[in-house]
Amino acid sequence: MSTDSLAVYVIGQGLNEDMAIRLAATRLARTHARVEVIAEPDHRERFDKLLGALPGLEVTAFEGTVHTPLAGWKEALERLFAAGHAGEVLLTGSHVFGPTGPADPSAPGGYGRPDGAALLAPYWHDCGKDHRLSAAEAPDRVPMLDFTVISPGLMADAAFRAFWRDLAPRADAWRDMLDGPVALGRLLEDGGHEVAYAVPDETAGSAEPRHFEVDRLLAAGAPCLPVSVLLLDPLLHDVGAIDLRAAIDRLRAEDPDLYAAVIRFATRHVKARDFCTIAGQYEIVPTTDSAPQRAGGRRFGPVAVFIHAFYAEMMPEFWEIIGRLPGDAHLFLTTATEANAGAIRAFLDDKGWPAEAREVRVVEENRGRDMSSLFITWRDVALSGRYEVALRLHSKRTPQVSRQVGENFKDHLFDNLAASPGYVNNVLDLFEAQPDLGLVLPPLVHVGFGTLGHAWYNNKRTLAALAAEMYIDVPLDDHTPVAPYGTMYWFRLDALRKMFDWRWKWTDYNAEPHHIDGGVAHVQERLIGYAVHDRGYRIVQVMQPRRAAQDYARLEYKAQMYAAHCSSNNVVDQKLELDTRGLPLRRALYRSLRDVYGRTLTRYPRSREILKPFKNVAVFLLLQRRD
């Protein structure tokens, strides 16, 4: 480490996560004699407490009114110019995750500046492929400054100093792009200064590799990953074919600490549906065991299996699932009556399931059904610390739909949770290999149900209020939350700690038979995923191959049908067209009345039988086709 090496780390306005910031500062403090952290004045004390103990690190505040990385670098560099600093300087900040790779800047693949290079940048922007820059007289490519090493010679260059002195940062990302990287690239080219990049020239071929080819950049040794790639619209990930999943998987394998920081940011600040989409948090799980020679038990010990067998006659069907579980599973069953409990015990005795690996309890009430039977009746077991991973099952019946649709829903859950013994072992291997995996669930059911784009139904307002009361502080999805619809799922017990800690009461739930949408049970169903993200765990949706193929075919058909009604074949244009069309008066009235109907039922559950006939007539009149 050179005694005059200096790193400038800017924490600007935005979504700043302590885990990522502390990791970056710790790594920079190991490789630089001094680290200057620049933060917003209102947050200086917070970051001083978080980072102040690191050697050679000082937290200062922005002096100007613009609090962006470019503004912070300008302030720091002007101070260094005035002080006559003659050493190398690294510029970076909380807008990227990093540094990645070796902690030693001189190591191969690290972020050491090559001899002869005036500046080392992590990657470039290809101006020749960006139509927005066609009239900007920009070089073919310009250095992005996300993690930039400046040589002593360039620090002493008069034109370079004048550039930073005259720079006027703004709170506008595109203007800062033009006035920062583009203008600096032009200056470096005109001055004959060599610019080196942390990745080889052939690594990327898009206009903006840091977003569109983030996986290739990390594979080639880029020292950072932009936070902004996690915040792009999923449709941009789609049209740009961004492979964020590959980048994240690489970090998990090669840099677990930085991976954990990325996941903590994503679960705290990115909507669950968006993150599951852009990071590909889906798995097609083989039904045959991927590791049949697996030796010994798993690190997390026996699996807890919570089964609500309200219909005790379903025990033979449950037994099919139980038979696919590992032999050390412990069963926890609830039911409605003592007679049912006796029948369940007798059934398990007959099947030879050991008494010490099971417990049967009778619920105090059937309010809340499978939700209350888990979060109230088994609260003590869930919080005991005896188990790490669990499976939730219940005697699923869906009387509000036809028998065939209800049976398909149940099969969708059972098949995607426990299709075979090999499938179960493969799911448990995911939990073993990925400690940050908190919830594994079947994907959104959309066959026979109108969930696509509408799955909040009448639950969002109540859930938002309850989440705030429970200090579950994550962004909510817009239309369809990532949730265990049907309330069967695998989970890590610590991931649902807040759900089990909360003192639910039987009277929180609607009395039977008024188990309605908008009640606490349906709200809990949608709250589970947010509780998991709040704890910093990931959600993965799993499918067995046959189900995945069948459901994809139907989903693709529906997507094509919707897209065919749009003028353009580009999905971004399609969304714009739909957003600007507006709703016809009849449909707007329908949505308004549906919202009023749902809120009325939530407040007065017993009114459903009175209001339902009127609702059916209104739906018929408002949605009937008019040629």
Image: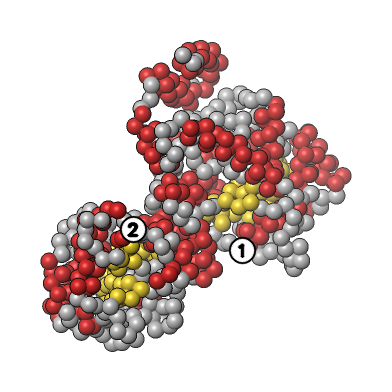
Q: Quadrant of the N terminus?
A: bottom left
Front-most of residues 616 and 531:
616
Considering only vertical position in the picture, is 298 above or below 357? below
Q: Secondary structure at mark 2?
A: helix
Q: Residues within 10 Å of mark 2 (few under 14, many from 20)?
A: some
Q: Left or right? Give the position of 593 relative to 292.
A: left
Residue depicted at x 36% and y 59%? 208
Residue depicted at x 69% and y 42%? 414
> Which is closer to the viewer, label 2 or label 1?
2
Q: Is residue 586 visible?
A: yes
Occupied quadrant, residue 214: bottom left
x, y (%) of residue 249?
53, 63
Circle 2 residue: 129
Residue depicted at x 49% and y 66%? 251
Front-most of residues 89 and 21:
89
Front-most of residues 299 and 360:
299
Considering only vertical position in the picture, is 259 above or below 538? below
Q: Residues within 10 Å of mark 1 (few under 14, many from 20)?
A: few
Q: Left or right? Give the position of 376 relative to 34.
A: right
Separation of residues labelled 2 and 1 (CA atoms): 41 Å
x, y (%) of residue 509?
55, 32
In the orientation shown, which residue stands out farthest toward the right?
350
Q: Secondary structure at mark 1?
A: helix
The image shows a total of numbered marks equal to: 2
Considering only vertical position in the picture, is 496 above or below 585? below
Residue depicted at x 66% and y 29%? 405
Question: What's the amino acid at mark 2?
Answer: Lys
Residue 238's tag is: none
Circles 2 and 1, Cβ within 8 Å, touching? The answer is no
Considering only vertical position in the picture, is 301 above or below 274? below
Question: What's the amino acid at mark 1?
Answer: Ala
Residue 433's tag is: 1
